[in-house]
Image (spheres, rainbow, N blue to C red):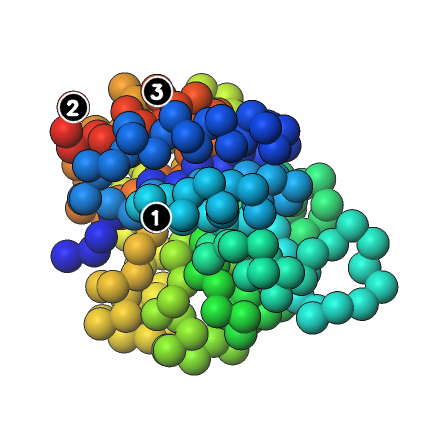
């Protein structure tokens, strides 16, 4: 049985003060959520303050990106060790907004993934097709390419520490959610790729989260799919009531 994970990606929202206030509200609302792990991903500036504010709670803290080098002349970037020092245990890698806005490639995803693992972080690696790719019936091809490139050269031990987030780009921030069946189909395909490469046991343990307009009113249907092990939530993770309703999907 895979333990569910609900992660909130705050993107470029919340000042430090807003972030701390938010987790103060969220903590009691998710205190009974024993059925899942809960992760929040604030912007870089608020990581340290949020990590302090969630101490002793069930909340874990993720960064939204990372550089692969330990240090160097990379203006605007942050290293894995810096994230650990700030209190992160997780890091989102390869989000479609980074792929679109910053030209993130599968090769870069792979370098970031390996560096994050080496620093002891748990990577949440995002994959997913655009609308044009889905309409051209290329979803499987895209997922295969992202998997082969992004996850190249990982040992089984490395792989056992990763989570994948399947996020069809056309469903992110658009209000268009993939149906639970559509999401489950892609999750099944991804798990099949993992099975081919790493075998049944690792494939069976891998947690694959769905992301794309997850809301309190669709989380129950999504989580009813055996293939869906959690959610990466954007917009609905910014308000304590909607995010806690998603986290508490089983107790509704
Ligand atoms: C995301 O940011 O990863 C995401 C899925 O956003 P939203 O829930 O707003 O679609």
Q: Is residue 244 left or right of residue 84?
A: left
Q: Is residue 180 left or right of residue 14?
A: left
Q: CA distance from mark 2 to mark 3?
A: 13 Å
| Residue 246, visible in the rendered structure | no
Quadrant housing the C terminus: top left
Disc 3 CB within 8 Å of nearest ligand 1 atom: no
Q: Can you give x and y, in whole percent of width and height, for residue 151 in the image?
A: 50, 67
Residue 252, which numbered label? Answer: 2
Q: How many marks?
A: 3
Mark 2 Cα within 10 Å, few/some/many (few <14, many 20+)?
few
Q: Can you give x and y, in whole percent of width and height, for residue 101 in the image?
A: 71, 40
Q: Earlier in the sequence, mark 1 or mark 3?
A: 1
Q: Are marks 1 and 3 in contact (CB under 8 Å)?
A: no
Q: Is residue 39 left or right of residue 86?
A: left
Q: Can you give x and y, in whole percent of width and height, for residue 27 in the image?
A: 34, 34
Q: Nearer the viewer, mark 2 or mark 3?
A: 3
Q: Nearer the viewer, mark 1 or mark 3?
A: 1
Q: Can you give x and y, in whole percent of width and height, for residue 16 in the image?
A: 61, 33
Instruction: Judge whether 9 appears above or below 235 on screen.
Output: below
Q: Identify the residue position indicated by label 1 in the image.
A: 56
Q: Nearer the viewer, mark 1 or mark 2?
A: 1
Q: Secondary structure at mark 1?
A: loop
Q: Identify the residue position indicated by label 3 in the image.
A: 241
Q: Nearer the viewer, residue 155 or 121?
A: 121
Mark 3 Cα within 10 Å, few/some/many (few <14, many 20+)?
some
Residue in the image at 33% along x and 44% along y: 57
Instruction: Judge whether 137 appears above or below 174 on screen.
Output: below
Q: Secondary structure at mark 3?
A: helix
Q: Secondary structure at mark 2?
A: loop
Q: CA distance from mark 1 to mark 2?
A: 25 Å
């Amino acid at each position: 049985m895979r333990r569910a994970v609900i992660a909130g990606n705050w993107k470029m929202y919340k000042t430090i003060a807003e972030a701390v206030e938010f987790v103060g509200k969220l903590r009691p609302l998710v205190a009974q959520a024993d059925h899942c792990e809960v992760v929040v991903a604030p912007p870089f500036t608020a990581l340290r303050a949020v990590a302090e504010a969630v101490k002793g709670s069930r909340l874990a803290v993720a960064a939204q990106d990372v550089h692969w080098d330990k240090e160097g002349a990379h203006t605007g970037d942050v290293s894995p060790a810096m994230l650990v020092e700030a209190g992160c245990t997780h890091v989102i890698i390869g989000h479609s907004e980074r792929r679109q806005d910053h030209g993130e490639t599968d090769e870069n995803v792979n370098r970031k993934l390996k560096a994050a693992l080496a620093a002891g972080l748990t990577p949440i690696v995002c994959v997913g097709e655009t609308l044009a790719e889905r309409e051209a019936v290329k979803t499987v091809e895209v997922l295969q390419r992202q998997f082969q490139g992004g996850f190249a050269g990982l040992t089984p031990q490395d792989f056992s520490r990763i989570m994948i987030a399947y996020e069809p780009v056309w469903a992110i921030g658009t209000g268009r959610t993939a149906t639970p069946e559509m999401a489950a189909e892609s999750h099944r395909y991804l798990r099949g790729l993992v099975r081919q490469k790493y075998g049944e046991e690792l494939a069976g343990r891998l947690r694959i989260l769905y992301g794309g307009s997850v809301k309190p009113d669709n989380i129950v249907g999504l989580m009813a799919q055996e293939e869906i092990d959690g959610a990466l939530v954007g917009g609905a993770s910014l308000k304590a009531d909607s995010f806690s309703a998603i986290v508490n999907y089983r107790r509704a």
